[in-house]
């Protein structure tokens, strides 16, 4: 009997464990009572360990070896190739380390929520130190050529290297800094509170749902809930959860959070459902995933055409909203140096990513002690933005990624920005797609993304996917052109 179908069956079993763990994780962030944390950490740790054990077991490895010698179609060959890459990484981690990391992450997330509420880093520091130690253990076991960051980055963006990211950021940083300064200067006369008003949460939820549905998010296969930090998670082949948070004085905060997470959700809903649990049914990288969220949030959601359609509806829902389209767009495209990454405008956003990448490298190279992170954050922040955060909640405690143990994740946001601009530009070469977008009709754009990005799963590498979709590897010029056109032209 062919080994490949047996591999697919085992992979589906592992996917059931992973989706159960994801369901528990989603519920932990949304509805779980605080005192349930310790048991929940043990539950998720157990399931994570079981999945790891099945994937690295002798049975899976022997079947994989046999499948590598079989005559298979192109998708099956791609799945076997990707399984080999993943198995080679996974077998280097003992189950005990995987479980310990999962439990430490669950505890760290809870500690982070409390520390963020109190704006005090010290109670969270031991948890981050624990995660850093475990992360470095994982990096050492995976192995790397230049630095630990390479081993971690490969988990999120296969094939990428920290040195390459550092070079890219060194090229982008002066251009982004100059562009950001000019954009902020041009926005000086736009009142920061021009949108401030009364926007009840229930009405925000109504608008968010309508907008998400209009770009193609399927609510029969997903939903939106409320959390401290917006995220998207997939609990099954037809179950994608979005979350956002609300500011009752500014409806755009939650709306753009939903557009961002809906971009992730559209990608997950567009992956081949019948291949769930297989590489061909799995997103290829976070740099590609972020391209989808940033494309819908920024290239679509902040465009004039989008608001020609949606501003009248927003005014119906929010009687306090009285700006004209031109006034609204000036506010929407207002650039300002801010403390919070997820609330940063396009012109200044990537400076936040450069900050985090710089500090992560220093932590992983043991050049920066955890206890010194708040001071280092403030120093680097001042270098990039010209001022320092007033407290840790608006400084080094603002993101959930480090509590999750996701060191090495942040560069994928800027890679996503580059890829988003490039993919959007490529799609717009089809005149019918461009004309539809100008009418705020997005089914043709989504269909293009389904064909060129979503349907590929992980059968292509991130570089191969970008080459196939756009005709060239990822290049920053499309993104810089987009920022110049929107902010300083």
Image (spheres, rainbow, N blue to C red):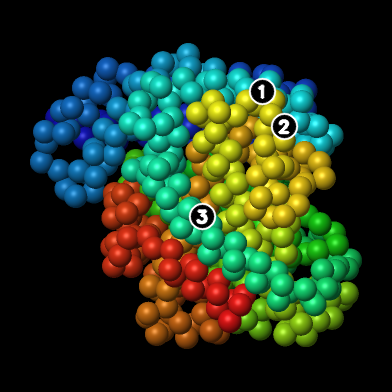
User: Horizontal and vertical percent for residue 378?
Assistant: 72, 42
Element under disc 2: helix
Is 327 situated above or below 123? below
User: Horizontal and vertical percent for residue 207?
Assistant: 72, 67
Element under disc 1: helix
**Mark 1 sits on what residue?**
127
**Mark 3 sits on what residue?**
414
**In front: 290, or 459?**
290
- Check contact, mark 2 vs mark 1: CB within 8 A: yes
Q: Using a 10 Å C-alpha cutoff, classify the residue at mark 2 as few (fewer than 14 neighbours), some (14 to 19) or many (20 or more).
A: many
Q: Residue at x 39, y 69 (%)?
A: 448
Instruction: Identify the image quadrant of the N terminus.
Output: top left
- Horizontal relation, residue 477 to residue 107: left or right: left
Q: Nearer the viewer, mark 2 or mark 3?
A: 3
Is 349 situated above or below 430? above
Q: Residue at x 44, y 70 (%)?
A: 478
Q: Earlier in the sequence, mark 2 or mark 3?
A: 2
Q: Using a 10 Å C-alpha cutoff, classify the residue at mark 1 as few (fewer than 14 neighbours), some (14 to 19) or many (20 or more).
A: many
Q: Residue at x 59, y 66 (%)?
A: 178
Q: Using a 10 Å C-alpha cutoff, classify the residue at mark 3 as few (fewer than 14 neighbours), some (14 to 19) or many (20 or more).
A: many
**In front: 415, or 465?**
415
User: Horizontal and vertical percent for residue 406?
Assistant: 54, 35
- Horizontal relation, residue 351 to residue 37: left or right: left
Q: Residue 199 lies in what quarter of the image?
A: bottom right
Is 407 situated above or below 214? above
**Mark 2 sits on what residue?**
112
Q: Is residue 42 visible?
A: yes
**In front: 233, or 274?**
233
Q: Residue at x 81, y 81 (%)?
A: 323
């Amino acid at each position: 009997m062919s080994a490949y179908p047996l591999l697919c069956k085992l992979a589906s079993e592992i996917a059931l464990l992973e989706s159960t763990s994801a369901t528990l994780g989603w519920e932990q962030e949304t509805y779980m009572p605080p005192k349930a944390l310790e048991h929940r950490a043990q539950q998720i740790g157990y399931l994570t360990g079981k999945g790891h054990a099945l994937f690295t077991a002798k049975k899976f490895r022997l079947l994989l070896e046999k499948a590598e010698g079989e005559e298979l179609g192109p998708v099956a060959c791609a799945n076997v190739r990707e399984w080999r890459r993943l198995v080679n990484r996974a077998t280097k981690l003992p189950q005990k380390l995987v479980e310990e990391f999962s439990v430490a992450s669950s505890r760290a997330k809870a500690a982070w929520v409390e520390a963020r509420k109190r704006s005090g880093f010290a109670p969270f520091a031991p948890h981050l130190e624990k995660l850093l130690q475990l992360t470095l253990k994982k990096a050492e076991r995976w192995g790397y050529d230049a630095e630990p960051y390479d081993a971690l980055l490969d988990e999120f963006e296969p094939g990428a290297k920290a040195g390459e990211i550092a070079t890219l950021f060194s090229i982008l940083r002066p251009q982004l800094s100059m562009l950001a300064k000019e954009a902020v200067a041009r926005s000086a006369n736009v009142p920061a509170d021009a949108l401030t008003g009364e926007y009840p949460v229930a009405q925000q939820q109504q608008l968010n749902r309508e907008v998400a549905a209009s770009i193609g998010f399927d609510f029969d296969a997903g939903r939106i809930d409320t959390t401290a930090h917006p995220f998207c998670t997939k609990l099954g082949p037809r179950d994608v959860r979005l979350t956002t948070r609300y500011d009752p004085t500014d409806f755009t905060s939650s709306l753009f959070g939903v557009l961002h997470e809906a971009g992730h959700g559209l990608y997950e809903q567009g992956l081949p459902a019948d291949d769930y649990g297989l590489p061909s049914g799995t997103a290829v990288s976070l740099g590609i995933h972020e391209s989808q969220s940033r494309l819908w949030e920024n290239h679509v959601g902040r465009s004039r055409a989008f608001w020609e359609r949606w501003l009248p509806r927003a005014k119906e829902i929010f009687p306090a909203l009285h700006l004209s389209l031109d006034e609204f767009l000036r506010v929407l495209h207002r650039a300002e140096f801010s403390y919070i990454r997820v609330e940063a405008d396009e012109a200044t956003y990537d400076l936040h990513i450069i900050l985090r990448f710089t500090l992560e490298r220093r932590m992983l190279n043991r050049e920066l002690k955890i206890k010194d992170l708040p001071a280092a954050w403030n120093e680097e922040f001042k270098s990039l933005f010209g001022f320092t955060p007033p407290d840790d909640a608006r400084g080094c405690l603002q993101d959930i990624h480090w509590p999750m143990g996701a060191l090495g994740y942040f560069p994928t946001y800027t890679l996503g920005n580059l890829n988003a601009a490039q993919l959007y530009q490529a799609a717009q070469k089809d005149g019918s797609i461009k004309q539809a977008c100008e009418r705020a009709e997005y089914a043709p754009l989504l269909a293009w993304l389904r064909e060129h990005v979503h349907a590929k799963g992980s059968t292509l590498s991130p570089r191969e996917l970008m080459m196939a979709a756009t005709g060239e590897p990822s290049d920053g010029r499309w993104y810089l052109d987009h920022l110049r056109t929107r902010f300083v032209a």
